[in-house]
């Protein structure tokens, strides 16, 4: 199966989730609102919220991160980008009243920003071979890096999951945290943090370009 075919199937997968569960945590494939929030809490550690900032939510789904940021009462301009037009529409529809919320499926429309956050966008690989998906992930990270000036963060399922307690599914990508830490250190910034201590089977990487 070619990469384009995998992308198409992946889009179909997320469209079906959205159709079944609507703009909710389950609609973007989380088990619960609680696990989505716990991951957001890690991702936003890259942000210096003491000053106003702009942020891209890369793979934004229906824009749950916007609502999360709003509860913090920070001063920010939000740009949600998603491959899937249906997700973008759901985000736009439910955030009409907020002048600082923008949604698009065309990443070339988004201005350069301070920060970029990508939550759970690499987890489902379907039939793609491990190496191919890891390469695709690295290419996407390079694009993400080019879109922000102060830093970015992302998370993914970890290869350090308990084999006896949790069977690893062949359609999911369990990334190697050490590989991605090393990749980010070598390619993007000297200031990289690996967070693997928040009680879920995944990890978060923060890449700070400005300290
Ligand atoms: C599991 S959902 C997570 C949504 C949101 N980040 C959250 O945490 O609530 C993954 C989303 O990422 C989108 N996505 C995956 N790869 C992407 C890419 N390369 N560019 C833009 N969006 C992407 C999918 O369409 C899907 O809506």
Image (cartoon, helix red, strand yellow):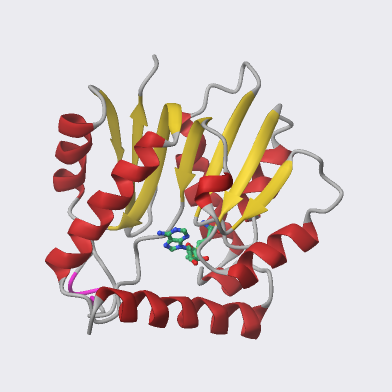
Q: Nearer the viewer, residue 70 or 103?
A: 103
Q: Nearer the viewer, residue 4 or 123?
A: 4
Q: What residue is drawn where x is 38% and y is 52%? A: 199
Left or right for 75, reference 39? right
Residue 56, visible in the rendered structure: yes
- What is the span of residues highlighted in magenta in the rendered image? 163-168
Question: Where is 201 relative to 45, above or below?
Answer: below
- Image quadrant occupied by the C terminus: top left
Q: Return the residue found at the far right.
A: 97
User: In the figure, residue 197 lies in which quadrant?
Assistant: top left
Q: What residue is drawn where x is 68% and y is 30%? A: 76
Residue 159, visible in the rendered structure: no
Question: Where is 9 relative to 184, above or below?
Answer: below
Question: Where is 47 relative to 168, above or below?
Answer: above
Q: Main secondary structure of the magenta part?
A: loop
Residue 8 point in image, percent of width and height? 41, 79
Q: What residue is drawn where x is 23% and y is 50%? A: 138
Residue 172 point in image, percent of width and height? 29, 73
Residue 183 point in image, percent of width and height? 17, 40
Left or right for 122, reference 110? left
Residue 93 point in image, percent of width and height? 79, 62
Left or right for 48, reference 180? right
- Image quadrant occupied by the N terminus: bottom left
Left or right for 192, reference 182? right
User: In the figure, residue 180 lies in which quadrant?
Assistant: top left
Q: Return the residue found at the far front.
A: 108
Q: What residue is drawn where x is 51% and y is 36%? A: 44
* Magenta region includes residue 78: no
């Amino acid at each position: 199966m070619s990469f384009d075919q995998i992308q198409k199937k992946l889009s179909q997968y997320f469209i079906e989730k959205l159709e079944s569960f609507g703009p909710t945590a389950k609609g973007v494939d989380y088990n619960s609102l609680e696990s989505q929030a716990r991951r957001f809490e890690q991702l936003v550690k890259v942000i210096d919220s003491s000053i106003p900032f702009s942020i891209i939510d890369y793979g934004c789904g229906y824009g749950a991160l916007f609502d999360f940021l709003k509860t913090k009462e920070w001063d920010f301009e939000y740009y949600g980008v998603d491959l899937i037009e249906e997700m973008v529409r759901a985000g736009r529809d439910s955030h009409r009243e907020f002048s600082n919320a923008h949604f698009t499926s065309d990443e070339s429309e988004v201005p350069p920003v301070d920060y970029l956050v990508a939550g759970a966008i690499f987890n489902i690989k379907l039939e793609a071979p491990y190496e191919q998906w890891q390469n695709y992930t690295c290419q996407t990270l390079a694009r993400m890096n080019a879109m922000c000036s102060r830093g970015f963060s992302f998370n993914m399922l970890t290869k350090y999951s308990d084999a006896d307690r949790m069977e690893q599914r062949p359609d999911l990508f369990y990334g190697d945290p050490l590989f991605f830490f090393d990749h980010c250190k070598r390619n993007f910034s000297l200031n990289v943090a690996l967070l693997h201590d928040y009680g879920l089977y995944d990890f978060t990487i923060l890449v700070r370009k400005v300290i």
